[in-house]
Amino acid sequence: MLVGGMPQAVNTYLDTNDLSKVDTVKRNIIQLYSDDFLKLDPTGKLSRLFMAIPAQLSKHATRYYPHAVIGGLEEKKEEEMLVNLEDSRTVLVSYHADDPNVGMSLTKDPSKYKLYAADTGLFVTMVFWDRDFAENIIYRKLLSDKLEANLGYVYENLVAQMLAASGNSLFYYTFEKDEKHSYEIDFLLSRGDKICPLEVKSSGYKTHASLDAFRKKFSARIRQSYLLYAKDLQTGENELLYLPFYMTGLL
């Protein structure tokens, strides 16, 4: 998770067992990505959209807001940039499913989406891009198994990568809780004639209000509900299945 899957980063870790050297390799790869984005878009907006992925996820917003990163864009231009990012294979796009049912691609909202880095190892480096390796607390906290709730978006990116690598299209769903708050299901999978909601938890796994509300609202549509977390496999109440992160690819 810290190293990621880029061959050069993996080889560096195997050769040196030094995460600081791995981080340097990852920074070089990210810089190459940024340089390539500049060739597609000399204004630098495409590169900024890519580099802002961790910041956007850390806000726990219900969508990626490109205007917060690069200012206002015409809808056509935003769509073009999103296509360029997706085609680069450096980014994963999760679309909002307006109707969480089988055939979610038919009801996805192309203007409401989240972006994830295609490689979580690169994502970890992007989070602390403007700081020295020694200041990247994610390395220390993950190695000590003490990643805090406010860094849970690292696990969310990991789950997105694992689901996509297993051939799944990415969808999520939000619905109103009250006038100021919303429930959110991190990921939705279509299985047969039913769907499977997934909630990602880095801590506090015993409470899962969004998943509970979704299961109550759409009980007839659900095959199995999953909570992905850092502990062992177990079955919870009402057939909720708790899965360790490493089992995500088996869903």
Image (cartoon, rainbow, N blue to C red):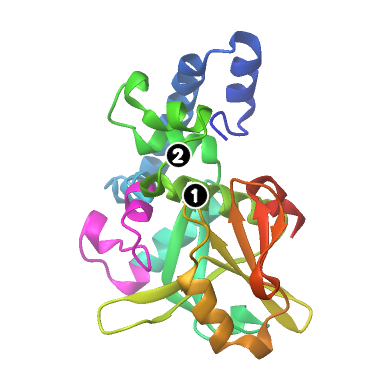
Question: Is 81 placed left or right of 87 in the picture?
Answer: left
Q: Nearer the viewer, residue 224 or 6?
A: 224
Measured in 3D between alpha carbons, the distance from the residue under mark 1 to the one under mark 2, in whole angstroms, is: 7 Å
Q: Tell me if I can see residue 40 in this picture.
A: no
Was residue 71 drawn as part of the magenta stretch in this picture? yes
For disc 2, the marked residue is 147
Q: Position of residue 46 (x, y in %)?
A: 35, 50
Which residue is most to the top?
A: 16
Quick one: quadrant of the C terminus?
bottom right
Q: Tell me if I can see residue 119 in this picture.
A: yes
Q: Position of residue 33 (x, y in %)?
A: 45, 37
User: Which residue: 55% across, 54% down?
Assistant: 87
Was residue 2 drawn as part of the magenta stretch in this picture? no
Q: Nearer the viewer, residue 23 or 48?
A: 23
Quick one: quadrant of the N terminus?
top right
Q: Nearer the viewer, residue 216 or 70?
A: 216
Q: Nearer the viewer, residue 57 or 201?
A: 201
- Amino acid marked by disc 2: Leu
Residue 12 circle label = none
Q: Position of residue 32 (x, y in %)?
A: 45, 31
- Bounds of the magenta segment: 54-77
